[in-house]
Amino acid sequence: AKSPVLTEELAEVPDIFTTLSELLQMFRGNPDIFQPTAKVLHALVSCGKGVGSLDALSDEMKGMKKKLEGISQILKQKLRLEKKYIDHMENKKGSDVSARESAKKVVQITKDLQSLYDILNCFGDAPAGEYSVVEPRSAKNTIVRKAFMETQNIPSLNRM
């Protein structure tokens, strides 16, 4: 997806945006598929092919944008629930193993959400800050705190 020629050729494939957004939807829990798909989709959207005003977007692009917004809502809800679980675990002195797993989920969901927001920000029609990830807050548990530190330096797809 880093080759401009390949990216432009890929953007010409019929229903490419629909196909890639459906892949993101189906594999939102699998970072091995989600992250590379998001990178390709970001390269396609940011390669300058008709992205700009929502009025000027094709029906396929509008559908893709809606699907990505829906996926981001699901991920935000999962993130909220995991954070709530971590808070509960810390207050009840729960197991470190459970806290570690939950913290890993928070880190992965945060990365996935940032990937989606990088794509959505290419459209340029959202108010500033609408598509930005709120970093996980500090934690009492050392294991959770270490995992959350990973999210402090999540690279945006724009910088890759």
Image (cartoon, rainbow, N blue to C red):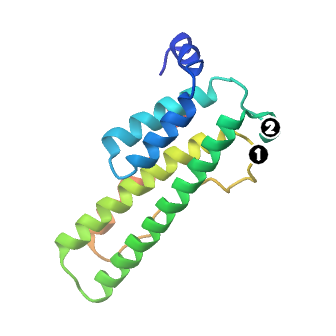
Q: Splitting the image into 4 quarters, where does residue 23 fall?
A: top left
Residue 125 — which label? 1
Q: CA distance from mark 1 to mark 2?
A: 6 Å
User: 127 or 29: which is nearer to us?
Assistant: 29
For residue 154, side relative to residue 14 (left or right):
left
Residue 74's spot in the image, x, y percent? 49, 61
Residue 130's spot in the image, x, y percent? 67, 57
Q: Which residue is mark 2?
A: 53
Residue visible at 40% across and 34% down? 36
The reply to whether the C-beta atoms of the residues labelled 1 and 2 are less than 8 Å apart is yes
Residue visible at 48% across and 19% down? 2
Amino acid under disc 2: Ser
Residue 135's spot in the image, x, y percent? 49, 61
User: 106 or 22: which is nearer to us?
Assistant: 22
Against 10, residue 86 (above or below) is below
Is residue 153 among what the camera can see? Answer: no
User: 126 or 23: which is nearer to us?
Assistant: 23
